[in-house]
Amino acid sequence: MIPGPGWIEVDVEAIARNVVVVRKAIGPATPLCGVVKADAYGHGIDLVLPVLMNAGITTIGVTANEEAHRARELGFRGRILRLRAALRDEVEDAASAGVEEWAGGLAHAREIDAAARAAGRRIPVHVSLNSTGLSRDGVDLGAGHGTAELVGIGRLAGVRPIGVCAHFPCEDEEDVAAGAEAFREQSAEAAGLLGAPPGVERHCATSYAALTVASSRFDLVRVGAALYGDTAAPVAGLRPALRLLSRIAAINAYPAGSTVGYDRGHRLAHAARLAVVPLGYADGYHRVLGGRAHALVRGHRVPAVDKLAMNSLVLDVSRVPEARIGDEVVLAGGQGGEAILAKDLEAASGQIAADLYTAWGRLLPRRARAGQGAS
């Protein structure tokens, strides 16, 4: 089969290196949960999990049952934590994979309890607290019902509380430090109310928190984005592991004054050479990037000038006269010493880069490539 018009390359060596960098930054005493949710942030659990296993990581974080079952098929025998509140049928199906569930309050814990009874086993849970103010699925100990909720969870026969957890709403050092201190106090209280055994596991740190605020690390850090080289934390040595690529399908010259693309959204101030790339918003390259993003052709940054079509976009390659049909186009990642970084994509889209690359991972074929660097 011929290659498709667009694909992503995953640098597995970069992921292995990023694990080393993260471990050095957080120190050897704190266990690391490698987060492979959203099919390893679009990088592919089949490609990423063997790297994590080789690095000695024995705990992973997932959201979907497919990820948990695939991990077991790949030979992973360690712990699997779910990092969101799951539906009852999801919990029941995941029990055979030994998934530790995220309990988002008493009502949700009752759903887990029902699934446990249906599966014929007691299910380990990590009870979510609202200590950090995310207000998504955590028990709020500042509310009048919080104490009773935790006591109620501890009384459910099918639920075995083994952890207390939280999640941060902001990548801000002061906000994380304040949330971690609140979690420190509330998690100790929660463990007692749940009737949890001594040494109940406490965890709230994600990549940014773990790498910037040491007090957030507690008993486990959940590291996702940093494994893939995408974090705002000021840590040297992390390397992006993904490139989005396509090729030039056509090149044409147009005179000054010509309009380009739908709604005549761009008008040429000068005569230009325009290259068509067969990748568009149906491929996960969101339409908001049209007229705002850049790509790399022969190591040069070139602008995407049109309002993107469903399956194509237009680059102005006037300043790259050597550009030819069939040339590689890099829409994310490095080429020839230049790079389209996560911060570039975020500036162009107004969203976090993960909003883009998790979509590419679902929609486009993946290829492993070792040691790509910025080439």
Image: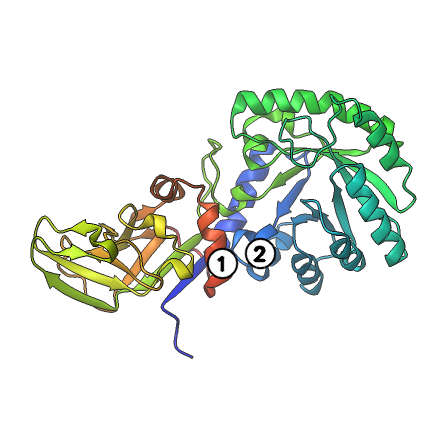
Image quarter of residue 276: bottom left
Query: Label 1 belongs to which residue?
Result: 361
Which residue is depicted at the point 46% across and 66% down?
A: 365
Image quarter of residue 185: top right
Q: What amino acid type is highlighted by mark number 1?
A: Gly
Residue 30's mark?
none
How dense is the environment of label 1, judged by Cα within 10 Å: few (below 14), some, or many (20 and up)?
many
Alpha-carbon span between mark 1 and mark 2: 8 Å
Q: Number of marks in the image? A: 2
173 left or right of 153?
left
Residue located farthest toward the bottom when viewing the structure as drawn: 1
Describe the element under mark 1 as helix, strand or loop: helix
> Looking at this view, is 86 or 199 the one in front?
86
Please tell me which of labels 1 and 2 falls first in the chain. 2
* Residue 127 spot, x, y in % from top left: 77, 37
* Residue 25 spot, x, y in % from top left: 56, 33
Label pair 1/2, CB-CB below 8 angstroms? yes
Describe the element under mark 2 as helix, strand or loop: helix
145 lies above or below 325: above
Which residue is depicted at the point 42% across and 57% down?
A: 284
Query: Label 2 belongs to which residue?
Result: 39
Q: What amino acid type is highlighted by mark number 2?
A: Asp
